[in-house]
Image (cartoon, rainbow, N blue to C red):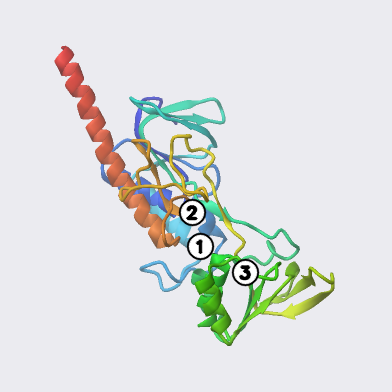
Amino acid sequence: MINEDIYDVIIVGGGPAGMAAGIYAKRAAVKTLLIESDNIGGQINTSDVIENYIGFDIISGGDLSSKISAHASRYGLEIIKKKVNNIDPGVDFHEIKLDDDLNLKTHSVIVATGGNPRRLNIPGESENFGKGVSYCAVCDGFFFQDRTVTVIGGGDSAVEESLYLSKIAKKVYLVHRRNELRAGRLLQKRAFAENNIEIMWNTVPKKINSDKTGVVSVQLEDTVTSERHDLATDGVFIFIGFKPNNRLLPVDVKMNPDGYVITNEKCETSVPGIYVVGDLREKYAKQIITAASDGCIAALAAAHYTEEKKAEVLAVEEKNF
């Protein structure tokens, strides 16, 4: 049951960043509510295997989500499954507006809504996610040692991930729709120097083919001649951009040109009492472990901020009395 009193902390988003924030907020003994419109765990639920989260040699995304959820339950974290429509900042408190017209008040907000990789939206992409289709070379590159992979994209991320994969895979095809890359010149120079990276210019993917073992090839189309052919590959890594889920944030929250939120070392935004964690935050590395770290930092900062707000109110009341 939702408590209509003022919360100390409300967390929007139930991925690793949001759940870590919830656990640490409860450890700080502040009144906390976590709101998630989908499944607890977020995108990690779609990962078949996770091998880069500390303490687990290997674990499925679903199992890790279950463990995170159980951990939060032991602290009595209040979680509701609802959609947030708006975050309205205020001086005395912030207001969270839900889709059922219920408005909740809180001293501080931790936004953990993350983002999503941009998709090609071609046949075979969603069907083979986690079975040869990936959006993270650091996460999944290990599975393609001495194998052939295909990278889709032409910006910094695509070239950086191609270079990363070139140290692991036997062969890396970099597929780009234009006749020149958009990546920085230094990155391009490094990619051109790698013997096992082959760039396929003026080419776009049209379909990802698979069998019961996973991805086997990708159908490519020449943008000049319109000819198509199948390129044998064991994996397809897609880097055509990442879309941060920033629609809930107030207009006064500062973002970089790509839509990622600019925060300080406490994960606090330009609006006091509003914090952003995980993939929505501007930072160097987007990994499960860094998301959880953000959650911890923001929760401790939000708890401190809330106690200061309460102390200010109490001081004013005592002075007036």
Local SS, label 2: loop
Closest to the observer: 170 or 12? 170
Determine which residue is flagged by label 3.
181
For label 2, the crowd category at 10 Å Cα-Cα, with few meaning under 14, some 14 to 19 and many 20 or more, is many
Q: Position of residue 91 (x, y in %)?
A: 35, 25
In space, the residues marked 3 and 2 are separated at their CA atoms by 35 Å
Determine which residue is flagged by label 2.
41
Q: Looking at the rendering, which quadrant does residue 6 occupy?
A: top left
Upstream in sequence: badge 1 or badge 3 = 1
In space, the residues marked 1 and 3 are separated at their CA atoms by 34 Å
Residue occupying image coordinates x 52% and y 31%: 98
Q: Amino acid at mark 1?
A: Gly
Q: Looking at the rendering, which quadrant does residue 159 occupy?
A: bottom right
Closest to the observer: 94 or 39? 94
Upstream in sequence: badge 3 or badge 2 = 2
Quadrant containing the N terminus is top left
In space, the residues marked 2 and 1 are separated at their CA atoms by 8 Å
Closest to the observer: 260 or 84? 260
Local SS, label 3: loop
Determine which residue is flagged by label 1.
61
Residue at the farthest front position: 185
Q: Amino acid at mark 3?
A: Leu
- CB-based contact (under 8 Å), mark 2 and mark 1: yes
Quadrant containing the C terminus is top left
